[in-house]
Amino acid sequence: MTDADGGGSDDSVPARLPRDRLFDALDRLVAASATERLFISGSALLLSVAIGFLLILVAGRMTSCGSAAYSVFGVGFCYDPFVVYDSLFLGAFGDFLANPLNGQFATTISETTVLVFTGIAVAVAFKAGVFNIGGQGQLVFGALASALVVYGFSGAVSGLVGTLVLVPLGLAVGAFVGGIWGAIPGALKAYADANEVITTIMLNFVATSFALYLASGPFKAPDSFANQTRTLPEYALFPQPLFPGRTDASLLALALAIAVAVGIAYLLRGTSFGYDVRTSGIQPEAAEYGGVNAARTVVTSMALSGALAGIGGAVYVLTIAGNFQTGVPDYGFDGITVSILAGNNPVGAIAAALLFGVLKSGSIVVDVGTDVPPQLVGVLRGLIVLFVAMPEFFRMIGQRVDVRDRFGGSRDAVATDGGEEA
């Protein structure tokens, strides 16, 4: 058909709706290469820093101070954004050039180590199509069991022999108890069709409440005002050969976390079990048709996920805490974001956990070294995590859900497991 002005137009081609362009963008995000995803994450990080920069300036105008810490065009601000971000990111490493083994870097190492375990724990469950929000409860029970068993056997051995026996024992106990606690919601989902989000949240409350009862009652350390178990002897903890005077960080524990992450990555990508996990997570019905026992795979995956979180709890006890204390930090919940940020890639969880470790450790430097309120520091951390993690979150949704089928339209390509999945 010809327009009145003589120009040609093809009425057979429908106008593209904004919804279609949104679907196309999601398709491109799903198909993005590793380099493109790294660029997207880096751009999101810079954008979050820019927005945080403005928030710091606004907050600095809304408060009062004796003298301006930062000025722009003659306008004074109480907080200096450059100092805040320098403390937040670089402060986590301390004076690394002068003293690579400084205490602030040790804090970053310890936080990163535990987060690697909780991150890959969530990633394993995600791969099987299960949303494990129960990592915190699995970590708490693993930590408690590890502290009690190691202390119970600490009187039988000592010295180097004690370290070689008790540390592996604590890790094994944490893995076993965490695995049992993770298998429960897995079995409920597989055989009773119970929603794993609800059951894992409920089991988190059960774990923390029961741990509180034990640490404040039968197993409470005598003469202690805090709700905690007895302190473990030094030989029952992870060796700290490179951080003299520190008992809360161990490069050996970090090396173990990296080795476990690499091992889990190989398990998921290079073994028949990993194939069963991935196919069950992508298309459970197709996996069943292909001979995969999807129900058993869900239970096994959740047990493995819980075991990894339990090891994280054991590492927390054997490095950071030295015993079990109530009020364990939310490593299990942070592990969810670590996994999303890493695209459910166990190796990628190492870098994602390091980012979280830097932010956690750097926040301490900002709180101590600047006048910036902790609430603002929490907002800055949340912005960074939100902006960096959201692209991977939408990519995961696009991989698992055919949005066009839900809202009309169709995709040209059919989702398969043939491509590289992070």
Image (cartoon, grey):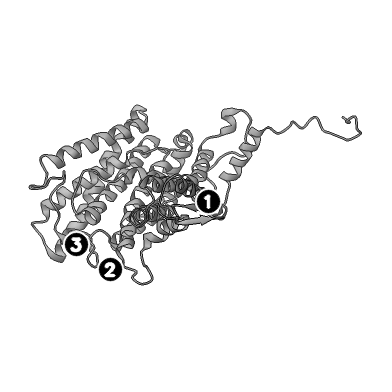
The structure residue drawn at horizontal position 39% and vertical position 46%, both measured from the top left corner, is 378
- Spatial separation of the CA atoms under disc 1 and disc 3: 49 Å
- Amino acid marked by disc 2: Leu
Which of the two labelled residues, at mark 1 and mark 3, occupies the earlier sequence position? 1
The structure residue drawn at horizontal position 31% and vertical position 52%, both measured from the top left corner, is 114
Query: Which of these two is toward me, 114 or 95?
Result: 95
Residue receiving disc 1: 50
Left or right, 6 with reference to 299: right
The local crowd at label 1, few if under 14, some if 14 to 19, many if 20 or more residues have their Cα within 10 Å, is: few
Give the number of the disc on residue 250. Answer: none
Say which quarter of the image contains residue 409. Answer: top right
Location of residue 396 in the rendering, given as x and y in whole percent from the top left corner:
50, 42
Residue 21, above or below 170 = above
Query: Which of these two is toward me, 240 or 126?
Result: 240
Instruction: Residue 415: tell me if it is visible.
Output: yes
- Spatial separation of the CA atoms under disc 3 and disc 2: 18 Å
Location of residue 165 in the rendering, given as x and y in whole percent from the top left corner:
17, 59
Residue receiving disc 3: 164
- Amino acid marked by disc 1: Ala
